[in-house]
Structure formats: structure tokens, C-alpha cells
Image (spheres, helix red, strand yellow):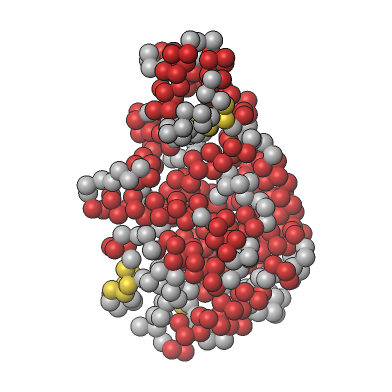
């Protein structure tokens, strides 16, 4: 039971929303992130980048749900995206949850546009929650009160129940609209002309949204989706080529410690002027921006053109040895990676094969998921595509080692 006098009712309790002024090291991290994201954005053909963003969404889903204790195998996520569900009820529910996350992540540009590209609103956070929970299986749409009473989680609806998260008692349910208005006003994009400050405050907003805990369940996933959307709104997501979830999951214990530490009340008169500790908020922002920079750096290395082409060549050579592919497949995969798409007749020119043999080779790559096209239109070009099963061969380290072994065996 949570004592009424333990609850926050005054929205000023969430202050400070940002450090004042921003420390120089946080501004430096924000600048490094801006520069690294710009280099990543300019690296690939837009069609190839879009194909890779689609390829990465299952990984974002895998890691965000893993933080919540739901370990869904990447191959199960890939099957769910093809509506191929397990007979086991628990595995099927995990697949549906993962598919819901992938779908919401794909809709971030649309949801941002509907919010006038301002991710710092209660309406936007509720839209994220509604889009995610509307597609969850029934058994994942329930939470429990402190006394064990089951409570239904209503999509996009603020909680009506008091909650405790670890040692933190979240604000009173009745006061949530006022707290969300406080966040909206404090993080309003038009109110901050300094871009580096806007980038750094994505980290601060991530914590303060978690602190308010507006929903009965799903706050963590909404917070990570919000952060990805906020980086997109600042033009830093490189078209979906990186996400916070992988980095936060790889440092899950540190992430949870940093979140809990930033819940602390102000230590003394030298620790800001709000109810909460400014020093702890700065430490959380530093951790969060370092994780973001690490993920952009990882993806920059993983997507370096020479490296990707070398791994494509190695994959083809392996499957040639196994008598599954022709060696000329490399020239097709190289061309679609560099150009995004190629005309169908281009396969013959690239490989020097006859029309019939070239078509058979293209069909082999289509069946493997490494090419995509519109099968109903024989004039549609072949596009770049990257199936989850080939992730360990093409982008090693994206998933945990044990999962990658399973995926290599499957591929």
C-alpha cells in the first residue's frame, strides 16, 4: 500500500527538467553525436539505407523487449513478420509482442508527422503506447497492482492507479495530466534554439518521462520509442540506421542503475534548484549520450562499404562451396548494395550469364531474401534486401553470440 503523503501532486516536483547551464562535456558529447550521425547518414544509397533500416527493426524490437525480460529469438521475430507463429502460446505471445514493436517503430515518421514533429507531448506518448498495446496479445495487456490485483492495461490511456518502481513512488495518478503538461512546456522544441542543448535534453526527457511513469505498463518501451523519435526529429537517426535499444540492453544493469540514481532528491544547496538532483540528472544524460554515440559508431563500422562488400563476398564463397549458389551472385549483391536497385536485365550484364541462367540466379537470391522485387510486375527492378537470418554473416555482433550461432545454422 502506498501512503497518500508519499505521492507527488505538484508538477514542479519533476524539476529540474534540464541542467542549467548544460555542462561542457555534455555539449561535447552532443556535438560528437551530431557529427557521427551525419557521417552515417551520408554513407549509403537511400534505397539501400531504407532496406537496412527495415532489416534493423527486428533487432530494435529484440533488444527493447529484452530489457523488459522478454527474450524472443530473432528467428521467431522474423517468422512473426511473415505471420508464421509458434504453436506454443508463450512463444506466440512473444512473437506478437515483437511484431507490434516492429510495426510501431516503422510508423515513427508517420506518428511524428501527426504530432507536428514534436515528440514532447502527452498526445504523442499516448499515441506510441496506443499503437504498441493495441496489437499485443491479451495475456500481455495485464499488469498487477501492489496487492496482486490484476489490472488491464488500456492502450494509450494514462494509469488510474498509484505505482512504485523500485524505491521510486511515481506521481499521483490524478496529477498525471498536470505533470505531462509540465514536461510539454519544459521540453517544447521551439523554446530551445541551441541544437546541442536540444540533442542533450533527449536524454533528460528520457529519464523524466520514466520518472512520471504515465502508463500502468509499457513505460520503458514507450520511453525508448520516444527517444528514437526525438533523435529522428533532430535529424540524427540516419533514416533508422541506429537505435538506443541495442546499446541500453547491452548495458542493461548500468542503464537501470542510472535511471534509479537519477530519481534521487536534491542532495544539497549546490545541487540545482529543483526537487530532484541536478547532479544525478547530468550523470544520467552523460551515460545516455555515451550509449547513443557508441551505437552510431558501431553502425558506422558495420556499414563501412568495404567491410560490407567483403562480408558479402565471404557469404557467397561459403555458399558456393556448399554448392548452393553460383559465384556470380556476388556481382549482383555488390551492385544492389552500392546502387540500391538494378534493372532485371542488368543481372545478365553483371554476371555474363545467359538470360535463363541469370534469371535462375536472381530467383535464388530472391528466395534467400537478399533481393526484393514486385513479383506481379516483371519490369520492377531488383532492390536491396537483408533478411534477419543472414545478420551474423553480414553484420556480425548485431545480436548476442548464442543467437547468431542459431541464425548461422538456420541460414
Q: Position of residue 133 (x, y in %)?
A: 39, 63
Residue 218 found in image quarter: bottom left
Q: Please tell me which residue is depicted at 48% across the width and 10% down the height of the picture.
A: 354
Q: Position of residue 275 (x, y in %)?
A: 62, 80
Q: Left or right: where does residue 202 sit relative to residue 68?
A: right
Q: Please tell me which residue is depicted at 58% across the width and 35% down the height of the picture.
A: 48
Q: Please tell me which residue is depicted at 51% across the width and 28% down the height of the picture.
A: 379
Q: Nearer the viewer, residue 258 or 55?
A: 55
Residue 318 in the image: above or below residue 340: above
Q: Position of residue 2 (x, y in %)?
A: 39, 83
In the rendered view of the protein, which quadrant contains the N terminus? bottom left
Q: How many marks?
A: 0
Residue furthest to the bottom in view is 5
Q: Please tell me which residue is depicted at 53% across the width and 81% down the height of the picture.
A: 177
Residue 410 in the image: above or below residue 67: above
Q: Is residue 176 visible?
A: yes
Q: Position of residue 321 (x, y in %)?
A: 41, 13
In the rendered view of the protein, which quadrant contains the C terminus? top left
Residue 78 found in image quarter: top left
Q: Is residue 73 visible?
A: no
Q: Nearer the viewer, residue 336 or 9?
A: 336
Residue 261 in the image: above or below residue 62: below
Amino acid at each position: 500500500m502506498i501512503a497518500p503523503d508519499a505521492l507527488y501532486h505538484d508538477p514542479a516536483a519533476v524539476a529540474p527538467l534540464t541542467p542549467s547551464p548544460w555542462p561542457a562535456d555534455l555539449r561535447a558529447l552532443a556535438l560528437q553525436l551530431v557529427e557521427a550521425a551525419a557521417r552515417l547518414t551520408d554513407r549509403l544509397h537511400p534505397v539501400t539505407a531504407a532496406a537496412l533500416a527495415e532489416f534493423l527493426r527486428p533487432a530494435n524490437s529484440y533488444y527493447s523487449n529484452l530489457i523488459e525480460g522478454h527474450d524472443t529469438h530473432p528467428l521467431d521475430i522474423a517468422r512473426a513478420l511473415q505471420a508464421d507463429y509458434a504453436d506454443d502460446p508463450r512463444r506466440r505471445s512473444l512473437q506478437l509482442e515483437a511484431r507490434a514493436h516492429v510495426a510501431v517503430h516503422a510508423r515513427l515518421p508517420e506518428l511524428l508527422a501527426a504530432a507536428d514533429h514534436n515528440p514532447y507531448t502527452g498526445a504523442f506518448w499516448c499515441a506510441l503506447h496506443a499503437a504498441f498495446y493495441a496489437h499485443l496479445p491479451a495475456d500481455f495487456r495485464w499488469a498487477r497492482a501492489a496487492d496482486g490485483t490484476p489490472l488491464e492495461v488500456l492502450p494509450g490511456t494514462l494509469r488510474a492507479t498509484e505505482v512504485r518502481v523500485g524505491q521510486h513512488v511515481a506521481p499521483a495518478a490524478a496529477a498525471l495530466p498536470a505533470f505531462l503538461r509540465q514536461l510539454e512546456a519544459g521540453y517544447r522544441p521551439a523554446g530551445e534554439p541551441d541544437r546541442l542543448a536540444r540533442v542533450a535534453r533527449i536524454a533528460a526527457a528520457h529519464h523524466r518521462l520514466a520518472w512520471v511513469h504515465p502508463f500502468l505498463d509499457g513505460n520503458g518501451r514507450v520511453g525508448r520509442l520516444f527517444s528514437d523519435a526525438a533523435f529522428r526529429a533532430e535529424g540524427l537517426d540516419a533514416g533508422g540506421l541506429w537505435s538506443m535499444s541495442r546499446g541500453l540492453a547491452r548495458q542493461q544493469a548500468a542503464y537501470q542503475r542510472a535511471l534509479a540514481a537519477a530519481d534521487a532528491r536534491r542532495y544539497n544547496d549546490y545541487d540545482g534548484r529543483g526537487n530532484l538532483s541536478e547532479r544525478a540528472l547530468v550523470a544520467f544524460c552523460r551515460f545516455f549520450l555515451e550509449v547513443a554515440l557508441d551505437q552510431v559508431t558501431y553502425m558506422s563500422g558495420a556499414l563501412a562499404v568495404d567491410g560490407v562488400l567483403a562480408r558479402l563476398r565471404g557469404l557467397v564463397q561459403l555458399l558456393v562451396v556448399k554448392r548452393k549458389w553460383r559465384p556470380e551472385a556476388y556481382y549482383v549483391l555488390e551492385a544492389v548494395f552500392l546502387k540500391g536497385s538494378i534493372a532485371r536485365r542488368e543481372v545478365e550484364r553483371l554476371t555474363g550469364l545467359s538470360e535463363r541462367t541469370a534469371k535462375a540466379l536472381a530467383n535464388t537470391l530472391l528466395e534467400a531474401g537478399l533481393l526484393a522485387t514486385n513479383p506481379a510486375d516483371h519490369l520492377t527492378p531488383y532492390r536491396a534486401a537483408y533478411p534477419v537470418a543472414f545478420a551474423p554473416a553480414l553484420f556480425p555482433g548485431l545480436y548476442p553470440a548464442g543467437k547468431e550461432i542459431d541464425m548461422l545454422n538456420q541460414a
